[in-house]
Image (cartoon, coloured by chain):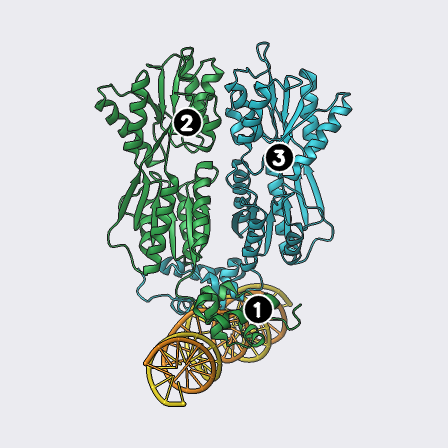
Chain colours: A green, B cyan, C orange, D yellow
Amino acid sequence: MSEPKIKNMEDFAAISGISRPTISKYFNDPESVRKTTRARIEAALEQYNYRPNIYAINQNRRQTKNIGLVVPNLTDPFFAGIARTMEGMILKAGFNPLLLSSHAGPEQEIANLDSLRAIKPAGVLLAPLGRASDTAKVAEFAEEVPTVLFDANLEGVGEAFFGSDNDQSIELIVEYLCRTGEPPVFFEMKSPINPNAYKRRAAYVAAMERLDQKPHLIQTDGEGWDFEEIGFREGTRLISNRLLPTNTVLCSNDRLAIGFLSAAYENGLRVGLGAGSALRVAGHDNHPFSQYTCPSLTTVSQDYDSIGARSVETLLRLIESRQRATTRDVTLFEGRLIMRGSA
Amino acid sequence: MSEPKIKNMEDFAAISGISRPTISKYFNDPESVRKTTRARIEAALEQYNYRPNIYAINQNRRQTKNIGLVVPNLTDPFFAGIARTMEGMILKAGFNPLLLSSHAGPEQEIANLDSLRAIKPAGVLLAPLGRASDTAKVAEFAEEVPTVLFDANLEGVGEAFFGSDNDQSIELIVEYLCRTGEPPVFFEMKSPINPNAYKRRAAYVAAMERLDQKPHLIQTDGEGWDFEEIGFREGTRLISNRLLPTNTVLCSNDRLAIGFLSAAYENGLRVGLGAGSALRVAGHDNHPFSQYTCPSLTTVSQDYDSIGARSVETLLRLIESRQRATTRDVTLFEGRLIMRGSA
DNA sequence: TTATTTTTTTTACGCGCGCAAATTTTTATA
DNA sequence: TATAAAAATTTGCGCGCGTAAAAAAAATAA
């Protein structure tokens, strides 16, 4: 279809009979040129299928159209889902998302930020590892590049933070559990990787005390991301040695609960609300798989549509304004109780 | 630490007392300059922390160091896991992986390839959607850019294909199920998105006939990626209406099996090998969550370490040789039986 | 020491585009 | 139709680097 080879914008300008600066203007914003000119350019575009060189563009633009999106662990369907919706929003706004996962730990988190630095992003959306994060280096990055945090907060770092209101969501489920049966013990990791875990622990204690109940924490060893494994291992130990003080267990997150439920099943313990059940188990997060556990998991859903939307919007507005935030917006979204079979 | 601002390679050359072309040579291959020179550069590097501009590099290099990595659905932990290991290998080889997911369908798959085209990758690793893929457009892309397929084959497309030997793995589990109990029915989607599903169907039929058993296919409606939901919905229907002709169900993949197990549980059907069990359920893939179903899922694991490693190696060799493959290597790796509680 | 090889330096061009200022052309308004 | 405003064009610089050829310097071999 195309006989003369279009190698660059100059060639394309020549063949389409329009000046190169106007072509350049068109690619930066098709609406910025006259309708008739746009039509001529687009007609030529169909014929010759030219695309500007992205490296030349980014070398010369004051600001790229890249937005970094860093999550702690893409292998976790929970984060994969969030990343996916946020990616969609970034694309729709005409930016180019770059998805990175920090699964290997804080070094990789910093490495991710370093490789983002190399592509000079207009902004970054970061769900930090949390407790494990190298906060100083993350803060340093956030000084250079407009950065919005979500999911896990690092105090004072970045332009804004959007996350879940753990106080509200944990109180919600603690209240529910206390109202409908024995008060729950709280099952969690001793040294959780995620700062939300600390908030949830404190929220559990506070909620229990508010209800005149005695808090009881069960804290297991275990490092890393293999939450189901940890929940299963510790669940097995607790159940087979009859170490549970009540028949109700609130797990710090759904993945621990999934492991715990599996342990209960393997040990012949019936979980659920009914009369014939020996145990109630609840989680937190409304993990994609929590619907298919046996029994299905009662949990609290995080409002990740809002968290994602607000994070992206905030960053985009910041980028557009070409200046930094005057105040650091911290907004927490409420959870919703998801009642299912397990509690 | 650094008083004079290093804005580009020329500044850095001046400050380190070495000529710019030599600095350039160093960044393209640190081993290519004399030891003493390298030491001087690295000393200066520590002081001034300079990094070459990646856009300027890629604009001028004959070939970038980018490698595209496209999977059908990052929300599926199975693909997330594969992508993660392959990413690691690409990085170790000194290339820059770019991870994309085609979850929204064939249009996004093509959009992914288009955005990869824009960054002029040295090569691409592609797990196509399969049946739904726009094969002509994928093939066109693979003509332009060295592309290795994995997981799902598109006949004749790309330089090579690496995947699982569905014939072997399905026969393995069919043989096991027949040997230890009633012969299995095969539970699958009527119009599966993945070509492996077709291979598995055929492999099931062949394996059953080889064992002198009558194959029985149960094919459900349902589109998209929500396999657990489909498995649950259809499982509920089959169980509550007593439509199963045997007590053994082989699911086309683990995610269907997870939904099916959940349905069995909800309907009070005990699953497992034991005498007290009414049903046996098996899957295929050794999905990360298959270990934590109730009961844990008997399945076949795919050798994804080998598939990933061979795919990456093959592409890297191709890139290094700077020429296309003379023959299209198709290698299938064998599955391994994972015996657990469900069958 | 001299001759040879390897490495570095010098010089210079080109990549494909953004961007700015001044000029010209086209369109909208009076 | 004249006038003002908007859009397009011309001209030209600069971004930061890869790369090539020739000259110079350094390391190695004879």
The image quarter containing residue B6 is bottom left
- Are the residues tagged 2 and 1 within 8 Å (C-beta)? no
Q: Secondary structure at mark 2?
A: helix
Relative image position of residue B55 (x, y in whole percent): 47, 63
Relative image position of residue A36 (x, y in whole percent): 50, 72
**Amino acid at dot 3:** Asp
User: How far separated are the C-alphas under marks 2 and 3?
Assistant: 27 Å
Q: Which residue is mark 2?
A: A256
Residue A308 appears in view: yes
Q: Which residue is mark 3?
A: B303
Tag 3 subunit: B
Q: Which residue is mark 1?
A: A43
**Amino acid at dot 2:** Leu
Mark nearest the camera among 2 and 1 is: 1
User: How far separated are the C-alphas under marks 3 and 1?
Assistant: 49 Å
**Amino acid at dot 1:** Ala
Q: Nearer the viewer, residue B92 or B290?
A: B290
Mark nearest the camera among 3 and 1 is: 1
Q: Is residue B310 above or below residue C8?
A: above
Tag 2 subunit: A
Q: Is residue B232 left or right of residue B131?
A: left
Crowding at label 2, few (<14), some or many (≥20) Cα neighbours within 10 Å? Answer: many
Quadrant location of the N terminus of chain B?
bottom left
Mark 2 or 1, nearer chain start: 1
Tag 1 subunit: A
Q: Is residue C16 above or below residue B338?
A: below
